[in-house]
Amino acid sequence: MILGLSAALGAAVVFGIASILQAVGSRKVPTGSELDPRRFGGFVIALLKQPAWLGALVLQLAGFGLHFVALRLLPLYLAQAGIAVSLVVTALLATRLMADRLSAIEWSAVVAVCGGLGLLAVSSGDAGEAAVHHGLTIGVIGGLIAIAVLGGVASRSQHASATAVLGVLAGFGYAGVAISARMLDDSSIGALFSSPTTYTLPVSAALAFILYSLALQRGSVTLATTPMIALQTITPAAVGVFLLDDKIRDGWYAGAIAGFAITAVGALILVRFESVKDEAATDSATSTPAHPEGADPR
């Protein structure tokens, strides 16, 4: 438990720093980018040319290594809730790097995330054993196909609503990462390479990362991040308890539910500190000439 929780908190710190870099780098790529196979290579190359985005990618990979340890050792509801601490890290960095200030409500949210996670840790039982679950594996594969198709459609729009849709899809993608990590069969080298989740795991991660980057380009980072955080936390938690045999300590069901809810609410309040805007994007927006009457503002 201690090793798994330490890994989850370490991952949260790394993810919190990476989120700032990813937002800055993504906003420097033209917003005409979309999840189109014919343009995908160019979009990725454009992102990789941004040092901030490249740094975010490196940190995300490092954070995932820690997160993977947590996913294998902890119930999914605790491992995913632990990642919410990344928002606390982002908020505290915002106060240092961007001269932002936390209001009383936001300081309360910081306390809520930490306190809720502590209550959840005390309430948690053993993680379910890693096991082959054919129905769930098929569901993950089907879900990834649907996420890719819907992401391609949503990325063709520059409307603000596309930001929320892409954020939702990114959240489901990251949920696929957590679920795949739990179902990974590492009993032998042969089993590892023959396990479908060996391949759904990196595909889920890459797809979610790209979709979140596309969402960050199109509108409010808060609008992109809120559904992503909610779905990547709630979905694996439900799957872990109902399908993968994650346990809760006897007599602590109310405490687990309360801890999870408090952590989630606190995290959603802190989402606005994901809103990092580079000066170039701001200057560009303020210097854009007025559109002629009747013209499409996009």
Image (cartoon, rainbow, N blue to C red):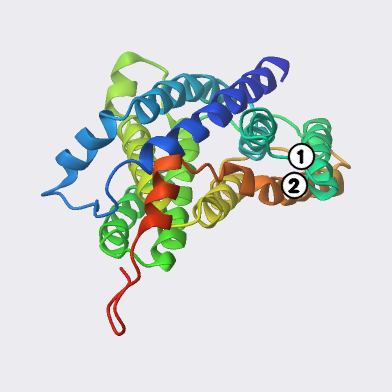
Viewport quadrant of the N terminus: top right
Which quadrant of the view contains residue 79? top right
Mark sitting earlier along the chain (2/1): 1
Report the amino acid beneath label 1: Val
**Residue displayed at 74% across by 47% down:** 266
Nearest the viewer among 231 and 156 is 156
Give the amino acid at mark 2: Gly
| Residue 63 on image: x %, y % | 51, 23
**Which residue in the protein does label 2 denote?**
266
Q: Residue 271, can we see it?
A: yes
Identify the residue at horizontal 46%, vertical 42% (top origin): 174
Give the left or right position of residue 72, taking residue 135 as reference. right
Residue at image point 38% right, 35% down: 25
Between 156 and 144, the one nearer to me in the picture: 156
Side of 100 where 108 appears, left or right: right
Residue 203: name its quadrant: top left
Q: Is residue 180 left or right of residue 268?
A: left
Mark 1 is surrounded, within 10 Å at the Cα level, by few (under 14), some (14 to 19) or many (20 or more) other residues, namely many
Quadrant housing residue 47: top left
Q: Which mark is on residue 113?
A: 1
Q: Report if residue 180 is visible in the image.
A: no
